[in-house]
Image (tube, rainbow, N blue to C red):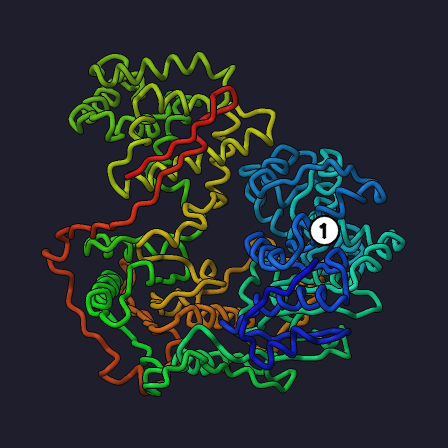
């Protein structure tokens, strides 16, 4: 028996959206208005009111995390053992369809899904099978590899097939030879993937579209099965995904889409904000419900965010559909109307980036120390940067002030010092004359090799024209000789063992493994967790690839680092760590923090300069409806809006006049003035005068002692024949 377990207090607009009947429904859900609640409650409503069986509802999301969360919420209300739910990401849905139906369009349903690094490897291995001239220069044949892959991916986003591309070229006159070369390469690359029985993420969508278009009888089956279709984060769909949605809806028109055009920030991934803005053009009888009651931020933050986003008019749903999207705060304190409004947004202005970072650190210390009624912890604070590399001065400043922090952005695991150490070991096995990798290996603290010994090795190597490894063989001390013995032993094992097994042996034989299992501090515990994640990644690589040798794995690691494809250095457990969170604004989407700093607010940083793709697709092949205004500036403004609306109670905007060694003063970001107003920014009240960092500012502070240390679990250090270790360490 199905039972409604929802005891949520819902507002009028949420109930209207949840209990909507049949036909197209557009739910415009502003930041913090409970959109996930609405979409999950609507699924439950459709089931409880007998409008559809669970298997007749298809709910599509963009991230596995969102799909999992939605499924868990719905699952609570379902009978035990009921598993016929279709709540998944676009790619998971299309993958499921193709595994069942790919034979109908001549594809093998046992295809392998490639990562970006594997796609680059495939193209690189087949580069000379493509009829290329301009895009394969003799001096640097790989120059356009990534550019071509991105070009092909963008064509897939726009639902442009190789046949469509060639057809367009016949009608076009401009740069005929270059476009023809690319179109032929696109076609050839598609044929190579079919022959190798592999697909990339773009293929998953376009091949499903091809299936439904070429086999209308199969499309009809799925249209008949899914009585109701729901799409979360609709503003993030690309043109091809929107076409897929329109095909699946069919004549019934029972589609619910949830989104907010003001939070469309994934243009670089092909997202077309016009899909939501022009939704009524696809579904003329659309009912619109606007959620404006915000359960996250103060009214002050919401008002300033609204002032900012108005500058994107007329390219907004609010104008196109003539609706009111101004958010109102529901966090009301009946004892104090002023407190309900919230504190004013502060603008911190320094002369140099180092001082900006230092002022941020001092402000965080001040907030932590002064919070009495509602204590603020380090984990309540988020520092939002526009790009990963903007975080470094801030990290250094927080360290100087003894403030613990963690970086939550992508691409950081392979950059962690302990991971670089282990990759260096693999690189030494790959090529023992790699002196940079060998030097890094010898520098590991655990080996206690002195700086003098390392200097002597370097000097001897230069003097005798030797590699560092050869120099170590001749004059290395006892500690170095022990490491050499392990390396030579493992060089004999390279042919028979995987990279993961050899790395495990290295940790075991050097005594590093035992040290990892008994971390003496929170920092050591963090290092151990990162290493376990590296082994997890290697284990996944082994499962997917026949060749998991040192050579193959080092090539893959190099390519992954080059593409920035390393996994998150932190996963869902980051909230348990009491540390200030540094993350990019893109990574902050969907998160919330009591205190937020948006930093480096100057021209060329936020907003950034528009970066054109290496090989942009022709405008004539872009099918989405482009806005009236400056597309790039509007996207950056939406990103700033997302950053502002992450804050629950306090918001700080910061900037400096000079960055790096630049001699020219930077202009303040226009977004500061759009949000706070000209007078507020210009007034003395907002300007915090800063002095050059004094010598004493570099004196390190002791990091605070955190009382809570969760049990350590290292599950990934073992390999294939090695028995899996499950270790819990109670600190």
Residue 431, image x and y in percent?
42, 22
In this view, the residue in front, 82 or 13, is 82
Horizontal side of 272 relative to 507 (left or right) equals right
Q: Where is residue 167, by image quadrant?
A: bottom right
Decide if residue 354 is on the left or right side of residue 338.
left
Name above or below for residue 149 compared with residue 497.
below
Which of these two is toward me, 373 or 511?
373
Residue 88 visible in the current orientation: yes
Residue 351 visible in this rendered orientation of the protein: no
Task: Kindly indicate the quadrant of the structure image that contains residue 341.
Answer: bottom left
SS label for mark 1: loop
Which residue occupies the extreme left position in the image? 696
Residue at screen point 43% across, 83% down: 303
Look at mark 1 in the image and give the residue it sits on: 84
> Quick check: 115 left or right of 309?
right
Location of residue 468 by image quarter: top left
Q: Nearer the viewer, residue 587 or 332?
A: 332
Q: Is residue 158 above or below residue 492?
A: below
């Amino acid at each position: 028996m199905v039972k409604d377990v929802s005891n949520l207090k819902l507002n009028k607009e949420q109930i209207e959206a949840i209990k909507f009947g049949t036909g197209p429904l557009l739910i415009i859900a502003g930041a913090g208005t409970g959109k996930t609640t609405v979409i999950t409650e609507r699924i439950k409503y459709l089931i409880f009111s007998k409008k559809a069986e669970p298997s007749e509802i298809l709910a599509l999301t963009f991230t596995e995390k969102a799909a999992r969360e939605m499924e868990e919420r719905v699952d609570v209300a379902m009978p035990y053992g009921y598993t016929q739910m279709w709540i998944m990401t676009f790619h998971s849905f299309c993958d499921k369809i193709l595994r069942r139906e790919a034979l109908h369009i001549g594809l093998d349903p046992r295809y392998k899904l490639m990562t970006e690094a594997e796609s680059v490897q495939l193209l690189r291995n087949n580069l000379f099978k493509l009829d290329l001239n301009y895009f394969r220069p003799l001096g640097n044949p790989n120059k356009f590899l990534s550019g071509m892959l991105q070009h092909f991916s963008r064509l897939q986003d726009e639902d442009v097939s190789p046949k469509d591309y060639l057809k367009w070229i016949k009608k076009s006159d401009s740069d005929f030879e270059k476009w023809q070369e690319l179109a032929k390469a696109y076609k050839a690359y598609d044929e190579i993937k079919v022959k190798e029985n592999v697909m990339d993420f773009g293929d998953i969508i376009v091949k499903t579209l091809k299936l439904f278009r070429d086999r209308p009888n199969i499309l009809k089956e799925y249209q008949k099965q899914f009585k109701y279709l729901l799409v979360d984060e609709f503003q993030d769909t690309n043109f091809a995904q929107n076409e897929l949605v329109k095909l699946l809806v069919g004549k019934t028109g029972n589609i619910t889409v949830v989104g907010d055009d003001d939070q469309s920030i994934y243009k670089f991934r092909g997202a077309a904000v016009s899909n939501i803005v022009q939704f009524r053009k696809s579904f003329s009888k659309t009912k619109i419900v606007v959620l404006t009651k915000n359960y996250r931020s103060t009214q002050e933050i919401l008002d300033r965010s609204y002032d900012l986003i108005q500058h994107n008019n007329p390219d907004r749903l609010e104008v196109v559909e003539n609706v009111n999207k101004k958010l109102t705060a529901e966090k009301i304190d009946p004892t104090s109307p002023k407190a309900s409004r919230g504190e004013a947004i502060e603008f911190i202005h320094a002369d140099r980036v180092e001082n900006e970072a230092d002022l941020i650190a001092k402000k965080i210390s001040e907030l932590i120390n002064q919070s009495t009624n509602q204590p603020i912890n380090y984990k309540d604070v988020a520092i939002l940067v526009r790009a990963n590399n903007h975080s470094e001065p801030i990290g250094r400043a927080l360290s100087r002030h003894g403030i613990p922090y963690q970086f939550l952005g992508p691409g950081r695991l392979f950059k962690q010092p302990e991971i670089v150490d282990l990759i260096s070991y693999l690189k030494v096995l790959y090529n023992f004359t790699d002196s940079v990798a060998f030097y890094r290996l010898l520098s590991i603290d655990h080996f206690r090799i002195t700086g003098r010994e390392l200097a002597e090795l370097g000097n001897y190597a230069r003097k005798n024209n030797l590699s560092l490894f050869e120099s170590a063989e001749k004059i290395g001390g006892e500690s170095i000789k022990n490491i050499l013995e392990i390396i030579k032993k493992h060089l004999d094992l390279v042919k028979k063992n995987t990279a993961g097994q050899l790395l495990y042996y290295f940790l075991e034989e050097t005594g590093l493994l035992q040290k990892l299992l008994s971390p003496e501090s929170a920092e050591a515990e963090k290092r151990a967790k990162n290493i376990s994640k590296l082994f997890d990644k290697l284990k996944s690589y082994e499962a997917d690839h026949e060749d998991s040798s040192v050579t193959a794995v080092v090539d893959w690691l190099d390519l992954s680092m080059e593409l920035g494809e390393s996994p998150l250095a932190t996963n869902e457990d980051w909230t348990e760590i009491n540390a200030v969170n540094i993350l990019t604004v893109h990574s902050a989407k969907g998160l919330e923090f009591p205190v937020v700093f948006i930093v480096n607010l100057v021209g060329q940083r936020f907003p950034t300069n528009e970066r054109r793709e290496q090989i942009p697709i022709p405008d004539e092949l872009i099918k989405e409806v482009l806005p009236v205004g400056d597309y790039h500036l509007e996207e950056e403004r939406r990103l700033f809006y997302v950053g502002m609306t992450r804050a629950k109670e306090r918001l700080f905007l910061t900037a400096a006049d000079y960055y790096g060694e630049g001699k020219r003063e930077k202009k303040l970001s226009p977004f500061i003035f759009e949000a706070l107003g000209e007078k507020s920014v210009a007034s003395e009240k907002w300007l915090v005068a800063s002095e050059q960092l004094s010598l004493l500012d570099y004196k390190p502070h002791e990091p605070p002692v955190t009382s809570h240390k969760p049990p350590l679990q290292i599950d990934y250090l073992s390999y294939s024949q090695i028995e899996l270790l499950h270790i819990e360490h109670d600190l």
